[in-house]
Image (spheres, grey):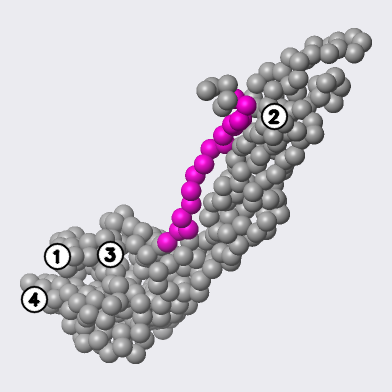
Amino acid sequence: MSPGPNSFRLVASLGSALGIAATIVACTGNPVGPALGGPQIACRDSVTVSSPAGIPQRVTFDPPVVLGESPLTTTCTPASGSTFNVGTTHVTCTARDAHDRSASCTLDVTVSAPPRLTATRFLAFGDSMTAGELNTTTCPGQTFIDSLGVLRIRYDPKIFDPTRAYPPKLQTLLNQRYAAQTSTVFNDGLSGERAEDGAIRFRTDVVSQNPQVALIFEGANNFLGGNDLTLTTPQTIEALRSMVRDARARSITPFVANQLPKRAGSCRGGPNASAVPSINEQIRAMVFAEGIGDYFVDLYAAFGGVPSTDLISFDGLHATEAGNTLIAQTFLNAIASRLEQRPSTLSSSTVLTSTDDQKKAR
């Protein structure tokens, strides 16, 4: 066979594809040499495409670079343009010459899909911290002098805005991350509720709402000023324990959050603010004792253990809207760590084989 200029270009291309140097010698006349060995083949780079809906996708890829004695046939299985399932599929390309000598290489086609959750119905259960009280600018009983010089009492202008509470923020985050599913987060917060009353309400609400997951963030009213913590702390722990057990008895996955940092000297968070770390340690111990330590949500740590004015309102107790965003993100992280499923994938590196080389090796 007399290699022409096209053969020289193919050698150069294959050498580049294989990462080796190719030396071409220019000849005059009509040189005659020994027949080439078995075919050589190099696959192109692996291909990754996304599937936002998590369904199979049609994928095309570049053909491999092939060198050998013509005529040559090249096939890839599955072929370019095929529909590939979510995950990683190994594609094998084979070159075969007229002497039935062959060489093969592989590449991967990966169809990536959004992660999925094992549950999509969430119940956000708690008090005003869940319901959406935020951005309080004054405290009960504050006095002021009006424009006429009269001493007046300023009442607490509580702001309730469920759209700025953490549950709808969490729902948005869930549906952004798990785009192939639709998650719902029902806001079941009740302002002014004590934990022991919440434990009673929890039993009826999990029946009516039928969630798969309960996000329990309860107890702030048990630790306000005027409470005897030697009594209210164990009451709160047992109320939370009751909710955990009720949830599990109904095959509901419970996540339990601890208390936010409170600002010392503030009208509502100030009293007993220094006791929050001890209270949180007892909440944590209960969660681990119930065998669900991986479902403990450490909001206190997420806030850095500090009642920042960016994250905690004027009253020193409730989260600001930015704080609610952080609460939602912290719950999302906990949910992802326990309930997220990713499509299984296989890994493969490009290989280069030749039946001719295998014969020589033997």
Name, please, the residue furthest toward the right: 29
**Image quadrant in which the N terminus is located:** top right
Percent x, y for residue 255?
29, 69
Disc marking residue 295: 3
Of pointers 3 and 1, the one earlier in the residue sequence: 1
- The image quarter containing residue 25 is top right
Identify the magenta region.
341-357
The reply to whether the magenta stretch includes residue 350 is yes
Separation of marks 3 and 2 at Cα, in angstroms: 58 Å
Percent x, y for residue 356?
62, 26
The residue pinned by badge 1 equals 289
Figure check: 205 above or below 265: below
Question: What amino acid is labelled 1 in the image?
Answer: Ala
The reply to whether the magenta stretch includes residue 340 is no
Separation of marks 1 and 4 at Cα, in angstroms: 21 Å
Percent x, y for residue 204?
27, 90
User: Which residue is rendered at x = 58% and y = 21% of the image?
Assistant: 360
Q: Do the residues labelled 3 and 4 touch (CB within 8 Å)?
A: no
Between label 1 and label 2, give the one nearer the viewer. Answer: 2
- Identify the element where label 3 is drawn: helix
Of pointers 3 and 4, the one earlier in the residue sequence: 4
Query: Is residue 339 rendered to the left or right of residue 21?
Result: left
Q: Are marks 1 and 4 in contact (CB under 8 Å)?
A: no
Between label 4 and label 2, give the one nearer the viewer. Answer: 2
Question: What amino acid is labelled 3 in the image?
Answer: Tyr
Of pointers 1 and 2, the one earlier in the residue sequence: 2
User: Which residue is rendered at x = 56% and y = 64% of the image?
Assistant: 54
The residue pinned by badge 2 equals 39
Question: What amino acid is labelled 2 in the image?
Answer: Pro
